[in-house]
Image (tube, coloured by chain):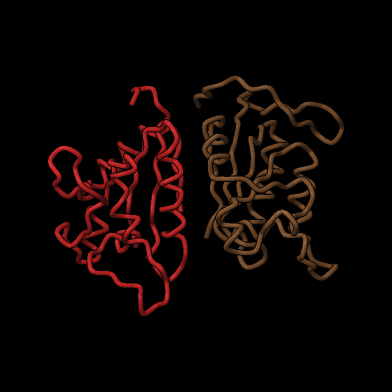
Amino acid sequence: MQVKNASILNLVAGNGNILRNQSGVVMKITILLLESPYNHQSADSAYHFIQAAIRKGHEITGVFLYNDGVINATALMDPPQDDRHIASRWSELGARGIDIVACIAAGKRRGIIDSVLVPNVRISGLGQLASMIRKSDRLVTFGD
Amino acid sequence: MANDAFKLMITVRKAPHGSIYVQEAIEVMFIMASFDMDLSIVFLDDGVYALKQGQNTKELGIKGFSASLAALADWDVKNVYVDGDSLTQRNITPEQLVSVGEDEETGQPLHPRVLTTDELRVLMHQQDSILSS
């Protein structure tokens, strides 16, 4: 598989060791998430994909939330305590240095604005998606 | 456009109006067109319904996107394709499709170019990235 840019990992495993993909190929990956949390599996799948990719030593260039995907970023969600808290997942990934961006146009339609965001997630334009894609070897879309 | 420009394809695969996917995919097209990219748009599967002439969303109370589609060429989005098999399966002829603007020089309406699935496959392989919605 061809990799256009040799990349430097910006993520490390929990034990502090930088992981390498078994094949030695490190990919820069942009994640595009199009569905809201809970209603669809997409947000869970994207999250688990990211965890697995990081474990394999790949680099997540960024996560872009579009369509109903922007709802993943709201701090107003309050799921039952025995269920996963999807917005917190994104916030935690953001705290680990992954750029998590909710689309401003899609967000405004759905009430996702700066004042309701979980920490470590930001709002910006589709230009950010363009920039992430250009910097990545792969774009992986999670939608319905 | 330079030959080494980043090649991005945006695919539209879902039927219009019943969900917002097509509307927001068109918004992505306009943004991506403002970057220096070699942009291709492909309508396939139920997405081909978005191109059918004579749609009116007034009764639905939805703004609709027909005006946006007709302005694609004005924004330099000229590589607009439609999957011929998807049309055939849905009994739609190329003549029933809207134009996506006018040719700058001739003033003639620009229609989406009908591709075979094989041609589409080749086009997809040439892309640096494919944005699916």
Identify the image quadrant of residue B15: bottom left
Question: Residue farthest to the bottom?
Answer: B59
Q: Colour of chain A?
A: brown
Seen in the image, is A91 located left or right of residue B87? right
Residue B85 in percent (x, y) is at: 24, 55
Q: Nearer the viewer, residue A9 or B96?
A: B96
Residue A101 placement, left or right of A76 = left
Residue A12, image x, y percentages: 79, 31
Compared across the picture, whether B129 is left or right of A16 comes to left
Residue at screen point 44% across, 41% down: B32
Taking the spot 66% from the left edge, 32% from the top edge, the residue there is: A58
Residue at 75% in and 28% down: A19
Residue B68 place in picture, x, y as percent: 35, 55
Q: Where is residue A63 in the image (x, y as percent from the top left)?
A: 64, 44
Look at 67% across and 66% down and name the residue there: A38
Q: Which chain is red?
A: B
Q: In this view, does B54 lie above or below A27?
A: below
